[in-house]
Image: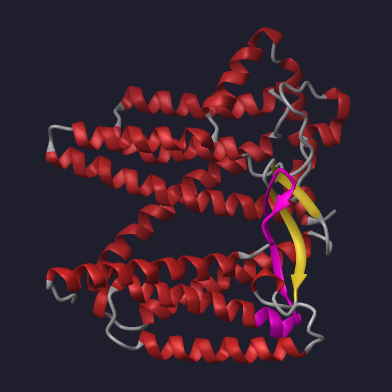
Amino acid sequence: MNWKFTLYDWYGLNVALFQAINTGTPATLGPLAWFFSLVGNYWTAPLMLLGLWWWSKSATNIGRADVVRHRLIIFGVAFLLALLIATILKLWLDFPRPPAVLGELVRVIGEREQHYSLPSGHATYSALIIGVLWPLVGRSGRIGLVLYAVLVGWSRIATGMHFPADVLAGWCLGLGSTVLAGRLIPLVARVWPTARHTSTSVWYAMAVCAFIADQFAKLVIVRTYAYGEQVEVTPFFNIVHVLNPGAAFSFLAGAGGWQRYFFIALGLAVSALLVRTLKQRLPRIEALGYSLILGGALANVADRILRGSVVDFLDFHWHGAHWPAFNLADVTISAGTVCLIIAGMYQIRLSKTGVKSG
């Protein structure tokens, strides 16, 4: 019995609790379970952001407005952290959902899902709501928040979508992401005002983070999916496992093997140039762009050195037309390019107004 099964099974308690809740919930409460599954979904995040923004703007007390604005930022950062970690855990663990384990013994409300059970995204999101709003409300509000999270967790079990272990893991992830975001934001806030001309280590660290994130994501894909496997996540997005020996849009993919060494040399040369560039005194947005491109470039170079090809796993499509699969390194390179474009436009604007950038 491996550790994954023990974590999932709880020595039989996980399935027993699920059956007690799922089969023990009266059919008359089905609409209530459906409702809390609806309001506990990630799609309500824009409403949460809008509500916090309106609260900060309408607050008559300046101090109160600042606190709400701070919680708004924490929610945004925590939401992204939780979404990233939950996706990685779902793909890596790939625990089966109740219908895949218990079959027709499960009472399902909605579509029968089979894979990616732990953690529960709904439970994660409900815990985010608790973590963000907890300091802003009084005793009655906190009781309401706890009741909301409990009902969302119950709804995922009652509808046959998740086991109790999935819900508990989601709550832990949501609260943990909120705490982590609360710790990270003050650190960034202290560094950012001086980051324009700060030590280059800040931007090198950003590149290292981009590199690690990409390589970890690729490791999960390689260990989870067979080569060529495709898993539908949404009607327009698939997780795939493909290898690209060429560059963007499979450029030189069929060149015969020499392109591997060409792209390694090119990537290392560009990376060396970026390292040298980041030693200069640069505006923050420009330095951020270079650091993201550096991290992404080195990540793809590492693939070519270790595997001979680049691992791609993000596949977006629409009505049968697929955009070429790409990876997280490509995303960071693209984001860095956008930062450089913004920096260039800003410099042009400053030159027209006769203002010098610092």
The residue positioned 45% from the left and 37% from the top of the image is 45
Q: Is residue 311 magenta?
A: yes
Is residue 302 placed above or below 179 in the rendered structure?
below
Q: Is residue 334 left or right of residue 75?
A: right
**Quick check: 64 above or below 213?**
above
Instruction: Give the camera-side residue of 132 and 356.
Output: 356
Q: Nearer the viewer, residue 247 or 133?
A: 247
Q: Position of residue 352 (x, y in %)?
A: 17, 70
Q: Residue drawn at (39%, 77%), measured in percent from left and top? A: 203
288 and 12: which is toward the camera: 288
Residue that appears at 70% across and 86% down = 305
Name which quarter of the figure residue 59 lies in: top left
Task: Answer with the quarter of the image where residue 285 lies.
Answer: bottom left
* Colouring chosen for the image of the structure: secondary structure
Query: x, y (%) of residue 183?
Result: 37, 57
Q: Which residues are magenta?
A: 302-324
Q: Which residue is drawn at the image coordinates 63% and 68% (left, top)? A: 216
Image position of 104 (left or right of 221): right
Most distant residue in the front direction: 352
Q: Position of residue 103 (x, y in %)?
A: 87, 29
Placement of 59 over or under 353, stated as above or below: above
Image quarter hosting the C terminus: bottom left
Q: Which image quadrant is residue 226 in?
A: bottom right
Residue 7 included in the magenta stretch of the image = no
